[in-house]
Image (spheres, coloured by chain):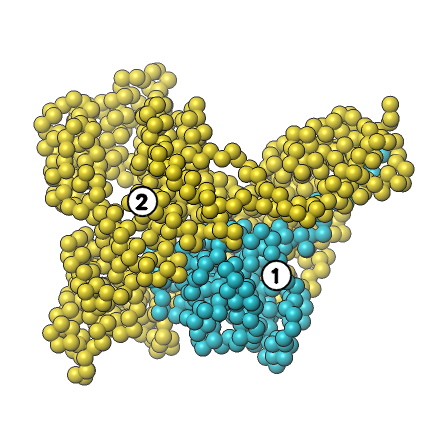
Amino acid sequence: MNIRRATIDDLFSMQNCNLSCLPENYQMKYYMYHILSWPQLLYVAEDDPGHVVGYVLSKMEEDSVNTDNPHGHITSLAVLRSQRKLGLAASLMNQAQRSMEDSFASNYVSLHVRKSNTAAIHLYRETLGFKVHDIEEKYYADDEDALDMRKILKHGVGKEKHIFKKGKPKAAEPEPEKKESNSKKKGKKEKEPAPKVEEEKKDKEVDGDKKKKKKKNKK
Amino acid sequence: MTNVREPFATHYVQLFQSIVKFYETKNFKKALKAADEILAKYPAHSDTLAMKGLVIKATGKVEEGYNLVKEGLMNSKFSSGICWHVMGLMYRDDKNHEQAIKAYMNALRYDTQNIKIMNDLACMQMHVRDYKGLLQTRHKVLQLKPGMSGHWISYAVAQHMAGDRQKALVTIDGFISIGDLSNPYELSEVLLYKNSIIQEIGNPEGTLKHLKEIENKHRDPIYVLETRAKCELQLKRNQEAKQTYQALLQLNSENHAYHAGYQQACGLSNSTTSCNDDQIQSLLNHYDELLVQYPKSAVIKRIPLNFATGQEFKNRLDKFVRTYLSKTIPSLFSAIRSLYSDPSKVEMIQELFSSYESSLIDQGQLPNADSSQKDAPSTLLWTLTFMAHHHDKLSNHEKAMQYVNRAIEHTPTLIELYQLKAKLYKHVGAYGLAADQAELARQCDLADRHLNTKSVKYLLRADRVQEARIVFYNFAKDMEGNFNAHDMQCMWYENRLGESHLRLKKYGQALKQFHNVKDHIEEMVDDQFDFHQYSLRKLVLRSYVEMLRWEDKIKSIHFYVRAAKNAIRTYLSIIKSGDSCKETNKTAQDLLDLEENKKSQKPKKKKNEEGGEEEVLPKKPQDDFGELLMNVQDPLAQAEKFVLDLIKFANDDLQGHLLAIELYLTKRDYQNAIRSIVRARELDLENAELHYWTCRFAQEYGANKNEKDQEVVDPLMVTFMNGDLNKYNQDYIERNGKRYGAKVSVAKVMHLLEQDEQRVVSLIKDCGGASLEECLRGFEFGNEIGINLGEEMRREYPLADVFRV
């Protein structure tokens, strides 16, 4: 068993592992978006011949990055059924968390998990120290509720009130054509609406292709 | 005639600007209205025509859109920068990169200082890897506006990709001096990007020096430590490397590369096969010390098993295994499987587990137990399970099956056992029974996608296609309930589905799946496009450069290689089968299944401008059974495209070269055929299938060669064959006579040469101890020459579906 940071060569394996294990899936572009934005936040676990048997795909919440409350988010976490009981999920999460602290000075990390997924909730709450922050009703494609769980990281110590304040969550998760399947999955995994990458970037990219040049009038 | 370049009245200027705004916010109707208003007054206004074309195309009327832009271009006598730019945008959207680049370059001839156009052009040039053009464009931009820091870094990346690493470093320094690097992460990424280039140049000292310089400015301690460690090892600064690796291990003790590096830094042997006793002892001491520091580390407990020998190995193995058994960790076999390359260790493993088995059965405990307390029943269960895996690995199929059945009897509720049994059935060719077991496993937990995936794989292997689809549909659907394996780029499914179709001679349906995989890969190549701008803005540049290099060889990914090989096989089968493939491609059941499957699907909708919904039309014609692909005029040419990809991106794959040989023989392209033979020989000299193809080549070439061929082929061929095909064949059987696969190939060659038929038959009947794949080859050949080897094969693989027909 080997735990290491993911490289771009691992994206196919991560996508395949995700497709094999979880009902919430993403297109390759979304994996590319992660590694091209937060390369420190992707980790894989591999077995002896070098096959990826588990991964964590995480990110920094885009809107929070340049504020006083930057925080990370676990997009997706999976470990093959045949490799359970080895503490891989916890190891992967710990590595990702530490990188969130070291590279992004993250105050806290959040994730969504199905209300019925007792095994995962146990991992997050008991083993990793997450707390339930909120319940988001009908969060999943099949209308199941999600627990919004959060864990304070070292930069967030002393800012608990700020982090755990209730109220409307910030900007609603972008929801363009969600390319996901629904399911009644109960495994230690969760999901995240998968914004089409272009949508996300349009918010930042002000130079829509033709705007500026068209303003110039041709003589 | 209105002068198309008349300055606009202000009203019309604003109208024109509004077209742009409306276009960008996708208000196409309003954009068109504004355009038409201008055109009412200035009907030949080139720029407006171009913009109108852009909008029209966006509403789906592609040809009309292009025509309008072309009209605009003509009206402007091809000298409107805006028209050319719009043209470029349209080609870009249609992924016609070459034309897009030409259009952009034309735009720049008339709009020479337009940085926006230059940026668009640069993205395209990067996309097609035109580094020379890219350098020129980025350089121009930098010259025009050196005050914008972004232009510096873009230029630096262009220099880097074009191979001018030293210059790139200088440019990066320029960027750092004028850029706004208040964002610490961005600064960190730029500095580490610079560092990565220094590394690439091959300057470990420079790398270390630079790392020291930036030690308070970077935000990636792991990367920095890893880089430092590598450089220190390179420079043989072992003391420093030791400390760096220790720091890394503190952060992650489960990383093999760290351990390997640490071992090396401590001056310990790196080989696992040729250590002397002293070296072994040092290694063992080393890891024992580490274990004190990291008592929970799985990796530190496992690594010593790689080089320990004899009793030491036995003791450590015993300890290692007992932990797994007491915690009922399912992956025990997987954890020690790599030890099976060493026969002495295999023996010790067998001894150990046999002793466990007898002790547990006789005394209810593992051997040498501390107390009289009995072990939990699970210990015996997982021991039996391990033995099943073990015997399966050694191809003792019957024993493996016995063990798994005993385990199932012991604990019928353990899902893993049914999966294991499925695997055992698969290994003896009993694909139907394997699928049944996988289904049993899946039924135990319908919410587990992993079980679902396995079941689908087994069902497809057993050619139970519709069943597989129904099972898969439990998970492979989107929010509207539409089957979404294609959307989610499920290449594992497409390959296996295609393979089933291929087995059943449904060549069109098969091709459809393999082309799906190819389409996904092409999608992923397109995906990089947005990142050409994005990454330069985000400054996460090491990743960006890695991504570009990854894209360059993306076709080497095993999904694509598998699909390519499958596609070639399919095309070759189509050629061989002639018209009959049209009959076999779809059965009556297939038509029924398609009807059934379409019932649950809803047409895709998207929001239109008025806030209502409209149907999304599929981009390609529906071709449900792949008939367009199957009936293509030039199947050989189609297959050759895949062959060229394999040669370029999977040059180490023997099967790929074997298929190339077959294709080129079919094409009578002897020059390319011999090249593949030469490469295949490098990969596996005594390979049985290669032997057959080499002989077949020799025979066909001998009969059909021409002078041009002789120039190229003869010098290569003479290195391994002197023209006496019979002798070549007999020599081969002398060298490889023990392998059944070799016998089959030799028999096939003898048959080609119309030699002693009796000997041919006796060769292929002699299949004792052969592998399943070898038996399949022999059986297939037997059928070709009218000999039914069912009886002989059933002796070896009594459960295999294919031998029971």
Residue B461: x and y in percent read: 30, 45
Please report the residue visible at 59 percent of the width from the left and 37 percent of the height from the top. B95
The reply to whether discs 2 and 1 touch (Cβ–Cβ < 8 Å) is no
- Numbered-mark total: 2
Residue A190 position (above or below residue B744): below
Please report the residue visible at 83 percent of the width from the left and 35 percent of the height from the top. B38
> Quick one: SS at disc 2?
loop
Left/right placement of residue A146 relative to residue B503 reads right
Tag on residue B281?
Answer: none
Please report the residue visible at 14 percent of the width from the left and 41 percent of the height from the top. B793
Kindly indicate which chain is depicted in cyan in the rendered structure. Answer: A
Q: Nearer the viewer, residue B800 or B587?
A: B587
Residue B767: x and y in percent read: 13, 40
Quadrant occupied by the C terminus of chain B: top left
Q: Nearer the viewer, residue B541 or B165?
A: B541
The kind of residue tagged 1 is Glu
Please report the residue visible at 72 percent of the width from the left and 52 percent of the height from the top. A206
Quadrant occupied by the N terminus of chain B: top right
Which chain's residue wears label 1? A
Residue B39 position (above or below residue B280): above
Residue located beneath label 1 in the image:
A173
Mark 2 or mark 1, which is nearer to you? 2
Which chain's residue wears label 2? B
Q: Are marks 2 and 1 on the same chain?
A: no
Seen as rendered, the residue at the extreme right is B9
Q: Do we see residue A148 in this rendering? A: yes
Residue B448: x and y in percent read: 38, 60
Q: Colour of chain B?
A: yellow
Residue located beneath label 2 in the image:
B464
